Image: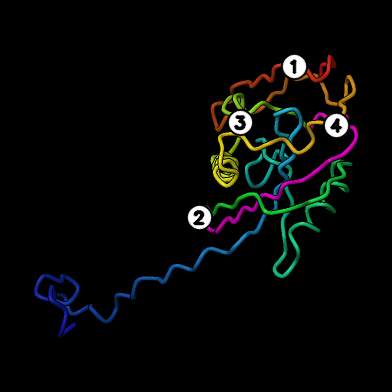
Amino acid sequence: CARCPVSSLCEARAAGREREIPPARTRRAPAALDIACALVEREGALLLASRPAGGLFGGMWELPSAEVAPGADGRIELQKRLWSALGLRVTAGAEAGRVERTLTHRLLRLVAYRCSAPGDLPRDPRLALVRRAELRTFPIARAIHALVEATDRAAGSAAAEPLDSGAHIDEGALPAAEHRGERGRAGRRSRQKPLTSRGATV
């Protein structure tokens, strides 16, 4: 206190209570959470998956993802998780982009990998193909939007070249394109227009 430049203004010192006042708490560094995301494209549309209602970004849509434990290979964890949770078989390739976001108690580290998903996509209401121009109409976290933009910048264009442009999509490969979801906290509905690929509506 003797060296404090504002000691003359300190009410605690004037009252003789300066030693009773505890020092300010040191804030803990946020714990890192690594998430691998699959960048799967079909006919210029991105594959999205809905998150469970509870937890991080609950009820929102994202690039299909998997949490990655320290020291684990993000590509392998992504392939295993998408197969076990969604029946989606992918082959994870090169890194396409990454972003970091600091939440209240977490440091979120998102890494996207370009993935091929040959054959038909699972018929699962938790999956949807969405045109890039329609991404803003879906309830998607800002961190995911930033990750998609990072992949675009890395590709050197506004839209990366589709990986599976030659893959066939059967009629009904994905559910009808109306999905309900919260848009942030507004609770608004989001609607996906049908996608057409080689005459098949998905």
Task: Tally the numbered discs.
Answer: 4
Quick check: marks 4 and 1 in contact, CB under 8 Å?
no
- Of residue 124 and residue 15, the one placed in the foreground of this image is 124
Residue 157 location in percent, x, y?
56, 37
The chosen color scheme is rainbow
Q: CA distance from mark 3 to mark 4?
A: 27 Å
Q: Mark 2 Cα within 10 Å, few/some/many (few <14, many 20+)?
A: few
Q: In this rendering, which labeled residue sits more in front, label 4 or label 2? A: 4
Which secondary structure lies at badge 1?
loop
The residue lying at 70 percent from left, 16 percent from top is 193
Looking at the image, residue 82 lies above or below residue 168: below
Q: In this rendering, which labeled residue sits more in front, label 1 or label 3? A: 1
For mark 2, what is the residue?
Answer: 102
Q: Is residue 117 left or right of residue 129?
A: right
Magenta stretch: residue 117 in it?
Answer: yes
- Give the quadrant of residue 85: top right
Q: Is residue 80 left or right of residue 184?
A: right
